[in-house]
Image (spheres, rainbow, N blue to C red):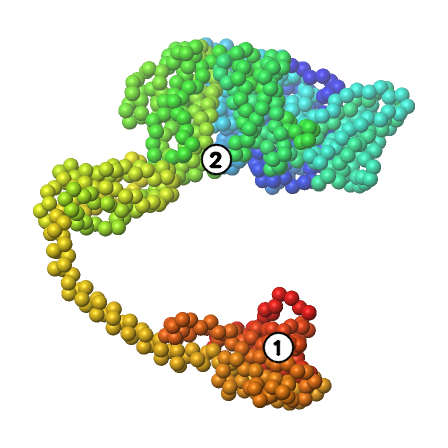
Amino acid sequence: MAKTTRKTTLLLLFFLFFNFCNLSTSRVLGDDVKALESVAISLIIDKSGSMSDTDPSLMRETAANILVDLLSPEDYLGIISFSNDAQEIQPMALIGETGKDQLKGKITGNLEALGNTDYLKAFDLAFRQMESIQDENLNKVIIFLTDGDPDPDAARRDEPGFMEEYMDSFWLKVKEIGLAGYTVHTVGLGTLDSEVMDRLALETTGTSNVYSESSDVAVAFFDIISQLKNRNEFMNISEDVAGEKLLDFKMDEFVSQETFVVRNTGGPLEIDFIPPEGVDPGENLKIVKTESYTLATINQDEAESSGMWKIKLTGNASAEIMGTKDLFVKIWMDSPINNSLHPIGEPLEIRATLTGSSSEEFLVEGDVMINGVQALQPLTFVKEGDEYVGVFEDTSTRGDYEINLAVHSEEEVIAATSTTISVKLLPAIKSDLVLQETGYVQGEERIVSSTLTLASTNLKVSDELTLDYYELVQRNEEEEETIISLVDDGVFENGDVKAEDGIFSGILSFDALGEQEIFIRTRGTYNGDLFILEKNIGRAEVLPPGTVSISLESRSYELLQGDAAQLLLTMKSTSPYREVVNLSIDGAYGILETESVALEPMEEKTVNVSLMPAVEANGELLTVPVSFTVNNELTSLSSESVDLELMVTTNTARIISRIRENLMLITGILVSIAAALLLIYGIGRVLYEKNYKKLYQVAGRLTYRRTDDDASKETGNVDLSTFGKSKVILTFSEKRKDTSDYFIPGSRYDYDLIFEKMVDQGRFKFMDGYRSLNRKTPPKLQIKTTEPGILVVNDAILIKYEVDTQVNFTSGEYVFSYESAWVGDAKADTGKNILEGKF
């Protein structure tokens, strides 16, 4: 279908500006965005003889150069031209390493029109280019440009069977490309038959377009790259200008670059861009003007160019304005795949990924257009892991379904994407596999059955239904796939019960640890129509197998006739799943009242299990084996059985036995206890006399001088340990010098200083002796005054103070320095204030 000349011209101007300025967005995108946007393209360009009429001005070369400029340094490109043969103009190479100028130089002069149109050779070479790329994170695409139908050899064109055999070989190659996951986008020129192009796109989930003019090739390439890179067009308007006209547009913080093409017709036109108030665009705004058009780009790293801008048009002319924007935040449609098929009547699951931001404030919504008419059911999404998932139920109408998604932030659309699928009468994938939320044990297996169903009928492989593949896929966190073929062969080892019954089976084995995505996919034809179907089953977590350990408090029991043995079992599970432990004994030995114990994931518990013996009281020792099993065969047990020793006896026999066995032992124990008590008492008294008294006596040295004396002059020196008391009184009063322990003369004050150990004496002296052994530091020493005395410690006025090892204080016109005599492990703490208040 032909595109309009106006849009073609504008797009060409846009591309030329890109080529001229070599512009790119300046913000560095995250690795996840780069992985989604990075592509590997094999570009196939037709240079057969017919191109001299279809494209005489070599617009193919211009468009190819534009495509090179549109790619990023992280992309790969290979270029192939073909006619009678296929020529590799440029092997597959990284853009950033090869250089765009070198790539464009190789295109120039290599597209001379001559020869036939051999599709097969071109696609075979393109397939080999795709296979040479090992990076699995690339989107691998073939872009195919031609103006003619397949015609490999004009001399043999009418030879019977020649073209049929050639096309069979060609479609086999296309099938190989499709199975490898390489998408083909076809661009047709002129009047060629679109049937081959459409099938090419269908078999590889690509796009197919036919254009009437060679100038439209640039438009086609632009559309394809925009789709692959997820870029958005937001302005495409026409304006008649008479004098001056202002057009508003917004650049928000989610846009990295906006590009404008303004084409003027009917006269000259002056175009200016007016930034928001307070914004200095500087180098972020670039404008190139010619007589007939103006090109402009606005870039930003963060939000420095954001706000309401204006385009100022001055003159008397008509203007066509087109604007595009590249976003920091992008939404990518993971499924369904663009241009894919979907069975009529089957719910359509839609999955999308948001890149460029992890904000939870974003809202993802969407709608569906069915054959151009908006469906009544809106699309709502919930977040599952990194994906947004929604379901569209109403697929009862055949036709084209356009799925549009938008990302909202505070009621503003900041990113959008769309895809189109075709809903047809096709078989639908059904499966009995429902993934359990608790996950799976490594090594666990499941038989999975699936059917292709149409109108509630399971289809079998027949002339109507052919299958290229039908497979169950496990995709791990590294995007590596494990493929299990689903078969209908009746082979038990494959999990299939009956052959050719329309039920396809396979064995799903959870061998790799971690999270897996499980889905079923198939490709084939139904009544001649090709279909590619995929059904997402969900995600499963595979965890390592657990272990259950079992231990018994005792294995020997002596019971009276009629009593049950109480087995205290400690069970510990390291399993991530709920485990059930089964217990059993031979019925000839007795009965277990508890035959199974449930353990929650990672649980440890002790259970009391009653064992009622089935033997008579005879005083003989009996060995009873108890067996353990777990329901999950992948879970290991520390012990699968234990042997219990049981003796069943009478009460009289038990008493006599106990007395006989333990008389000497009991006597010895009593004598030993009495001796031990005496020894303990004696040692405690010795410790009391040796340690306790000394520990609780005031000790240490006290020096003092008058406050008006020089700091180096010492007035008095008192060894407090010489008093041998737990409370030592020093007085300033002449009246009490005979009743106090020490008199300090020359003070105008009449009060006492009291040094007292904080004694915690117990009731028994021998116990105090033992307590003295645990003392790491001596008891606290308290210094206090009688009224009206005070202590000045570190500028604080106190009446009491507790000290550990040393302190300096002032009282009664004297400066005192106390240092403890303690030499143990005490810390050098100067003490603490024991008063709640100061005065």
User: For the N terminus, which image quadrant?
Assistant: top right
In the image: residue 639, left or right of residue 87 = left
Distance Cα–Cα, label 2 vs label 1: 82 Å
Q: Residues within 10 Å of mark 2 (few under 14, many from 20)?
A: few
Task: Answer with left or right where residue 680 lies relative to residue 49.
Answer: left
**Closer-to-camera residue (448/377):** 377
Q: Amino acid at mark 1?
A: Thr
Task: Name the residue beneath numbered marker 2.
Answer: 479
Quadrant housing residue 689: bottom left
| Residue furthest out toward the front | 735
Foreground residue among 494 and 608? 608
Which of the numbered marks, if any, corresponds to residue 785? 1
Q: Position of residue 313 (x, y in %)?
A: 85, 26
> Regarding mark 2 in the picture, which secondary structure is present there?
loop
Label 1 Cα crowd, 10 Å radius (few <14 / some 14-19 / many 20+): many
Q: Secondary structure at mark 1?
A: strand
Q: Residue at x 69, y 34 (%)?
A: 254
Q: Residue at x 74, y 27 (%)?
A: 323
